[in-house]
Amino acid sequence: MMHFEEFLKYTPKIQNVALPATHAHAKMAPSNRLELLKNIDFDKMSPRKAAVMMLFYPKQEQTHLALILRTSYNGIHSSQIAFPGERQKNLTAI
């Protein structure tokens, strides 16, 4: 664990770092998933926009990261540990 004040010193350094996206996903995906992804024509799909949040917070002066445990259901992401996140919703200004 890293002391939270030390952690805060590093956050400005990563604000403009490019995210690895697909490359990082490929490193973690099961090999059969990679084969399936090769055969998908994403140009014909209209995927939903979504986002995740990496919430770092201090607890007893140490840096902690909030994660969630997904509910158990008959599906591909059942019971996974994950970042909090959700699909984009249509929001209107108040």
Image (spheres, rainbow, N blue to C red):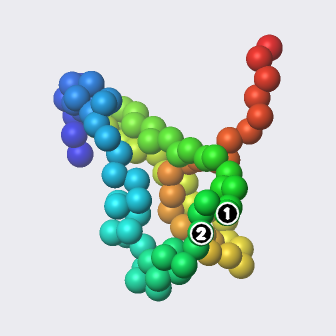
In the displayed structure, does residue 48 sit left or right of residue 1?
right
Q: Is residue 54 above or below residue 93?
A: below
Tell me the quarter of the image containing the N terminus: top left
Is residue 78 placed above or below 32 in the rendered structure? above
Mark 2 touches mark 1? (CB < 8 Å): yes
Q: Which residue is mark 1?
A: 44
Q: Position of residue 44 (x, y in %)?
A: 67, 63
Q: In terms of secondary structure, where does tag 1 sit?
A: helix
Residue 41 tag number = 2
Q: In the rendered view, would you say 16 is above or below 33?
A: above
Residue 36 locus on image (x, y percent): 53, 80
- The outermost residue toward the bottom is 32
Q: On the image, which quarter does residue 16 sit in?
A: top left
Q: Picture coordinates of residue 93 (x, y %)?
A: 77, 17
Residue at image point 68% right, 51% down: 48
Q: Amino acid at mark 2?
A: Asp
Q: For the residue marked with disc 1, what is the amino acid?
A: Lys
Apparent side of residue 53 relative to residue 44 in the rendered image (left or right): left
Q: Position of residue 3 (x, y in %)?
A: 22, 34
